[in-house]
Amino acid sequence: MSVLAGQQQAGRAVDADGTAQTNPTIERTRTVQSDRPVRTAGPDSDPGPVDPDQVLARVEGLRRLFKALSGRVPADQLATIRAVVDRAGERLRLSRDHTVVALAGATGGGKSSLFNSLSGLELSRVGFRRPTTNAAHACVWNPSSAAELLDWLGIPKRHQIARETILDGESEAALRGLVLLDLPDFDSVEISHRLEVDRLTGLADLLIWVLDPQKYADAVLHQRYLRGLTQYRAVTVVVLNQLDRLTPQDAERCLADTRRLLDEDDLRGVRLIGTSAVTGQGIPELRQLLADTVAARQASLQRMVGDVTTAAASVSHLVGPEIAEDAVDRAMVNGLATRRGDSVGASAVASVAAAAYRRRGRQATRWPVARWFSELRPDPIRRLAATAGVPLPAGGRAPRHRHAAPDPSPAQRSQVDLAIRGLADLVSQGLPEPWPGAITAVARSGAASLPDELDRVIRDTNLGTHRTPLWWRITQGVQWLLLATTLVGAVWLLARALLMFIALPELPLPTVGALPLPTMLLLTGLLAGPLIAALAGSLVVYSARRFAVQAERALRAAIAALARERVVAPVRSELHAYAEARDALTAARGQ
Ligand SMILES: Nc1nc2c(ncn2[C@@H]2O[C@H](COP(=O)(O)OP(=O)(O)OP(=O)(O)O)[C@@H](O)[C@H]2O)c(=O)[nH]1
Ligand SMILES: [Mg+2]
């Protein structure tokens, strides 16, 4: 279906929108004289010339709107926009020196007769057998540079007629640039005729609807075609032909009635001309109208304005109030991350990591002998991890460098789902469909990939479990020194006892205060080692607590970053698309 025919629905919506372009005041019908043209006339206040740059900007807005809505709205809802963008792009590319005017109407109305009268030639077949015209014919005044335009209109060469020749001199100069089309009938038994009419009325710059006294009230004409032309009043002309068949009084009544029907079609102000192709009544006026239209070179732009306005209106219900792209604020992200963190047991993971840290600290600061003994005992972290439901890496004694998230329970999962839905609902509040649906969908699909990625994030987040603080190393050095001291004292005392036993000269035994030096060394090692281990142990417990807090913070920050990347970023990009659609619609409306 052509753009025009397809726009009938949208045309009504536009009207409701109140964006009509022409003045609704009607010029009253004048008394009809049989030999005078009858005109009940057209827009009595000119909407003014259309600025080509403004039209371009509006078409560009429509193109952006199409892009923003594509993929979010079923393609058939965007068919009008697409057709208009394509048509406008092509029409702008093609000759602006030519104005395409189409004669359309029911069979037998006199389209071909008027086409011949206007061209002054017997170009199109006029006949008694209906329908007579099977394919569109084109008469071109000044055919140079119109070839591409005629190709675009799809008029085969054999149906193209060049009107202006050297023989005409300047007599046809007024119509130079006119491409007049004689269309087949829209009410034909031949479906191909109707399709051709729909196609070409969708492409022509100006449409002349040829009515006749018998069929001017035809319901198909009014409902299917005229009623959708509210936005095209500036480029629509209605001709009531065959007035010679009526008495002047009847012709006047008929014209008045036609005007009434046009008003009902919401086509107030549309130019209405009474003609007779037989007597020539009204033909000069119609010719003058065409000459003015061609000279103004506005019809193609006005037609485009109508197209863009109608197309924009056809999707205006898809765009609502303004909304900030950063509507997803920090609080929302944090809320989502907290739920996510809870669902993957961030606290439990942090506790297990802290326990591992504490154990390493304890071991590092112990008296070496005590450490050797303790390592023979089973790993307490494994027990703790099992209690907390935190899986340990395969084969690992304890999560020294790696940690993993427990599987979330169904309750935790549904809490996360709720949080995501809540976020989507909140940001899409007040937006028309398809946006809330699209926002929820991207948030959900982002969330669907989260569990696997959360596992990776939790595993890879550097909690510092493997870190060995300097004071551990120093304490460990001191413990080794104390062990050495103990050993030196013990070996010294043993060696002395042995020498005494085998009656060899005694080893010297210096004293420190009341105690011999080796005894002093032995006791220092034995007492100071555990003492330092106990002190360091308390410190380790304290720092492990801090470690747990920091580890949980790091985990939650990593989870928040992931939620931002996988859920918030796609939601923001939908909001961006919405803002773009809104902006583009404003541009397409020319506001
Ligand atoms: N009396 C009178 N007869 C007319 C007038 N215009 C056309 N006719 C006649 O009406 C008949 C139909 O005219 P066409 O020009 O072939 O009508 P059409 O709209 O082209 O018809 P299709 O090609 O079938 O769509 C012909 O017999 C014409 O001679 C007119 O103004 N007055
Ligand atoms: Mg015809």
Image (spheres, helix red, strand yellow):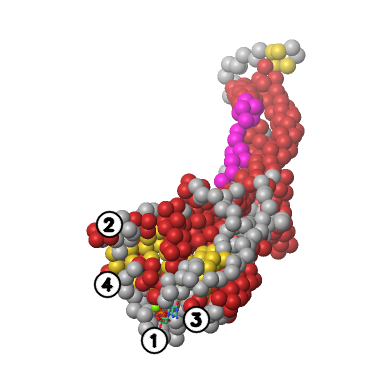
Say the numbered circle drawn on residue 158: 4
Q: Mark yes or no: residue 167 visible.
A: yes
Magenta-highlighted residues? 460-476
Circle 2 Cα neighbour tier, 10 Å, few/some/many (<14 / 14–19 / ≥20): few
In-image side of 4 versus 338 (left or right):
left
Tell me what residue is drawn at x 57 percent, y 59 percent: 43
**Is the CB of the residue bearing disc 3 within 8 angstroms of ligand 1?**
yes
- Front label number (1 vs 2): 2
Find residue 143 and report its image quarter. bottom left
Q: Could you give the CA–CA distance between mark 2 and mark 3, rounded to whole angstroms? A: 35 Å
Indicate the amino acid at tag 2.
Answer: Gly
Q: Secondary structure at mark 1?
A: loop
Say the numbered circle drawn on residue 292: none
Where is 526 relative to 429, above or below? above
Q: Could you give the CA–CA distance between mark 4 and mark 1, rounded to whole angstroms? A: 23 Å
Residue where numbered disc 2 is placed: 169
Say the numbered circle drawn on residue 128: 1
Looking at the image, tell me whether mark 1 or mark 2 is earlier in sequence order.
1
Report the residue that reaches farthest toward the bottom. 129
Residue where numbered disc 3 is placed: 245
Q: Could you give the CA–CA distance between mark 4 and mark 3, rounded to whole angstroms? A: 34 Å
- Front label number (4 vs 1): 1
Circle 4 Cα neighbour tier, 10 Å, few/some/many (<14 / 14–19 / ≥20): few
Tell me what residue is drawn at x 63 percent, y 69 percent: 263
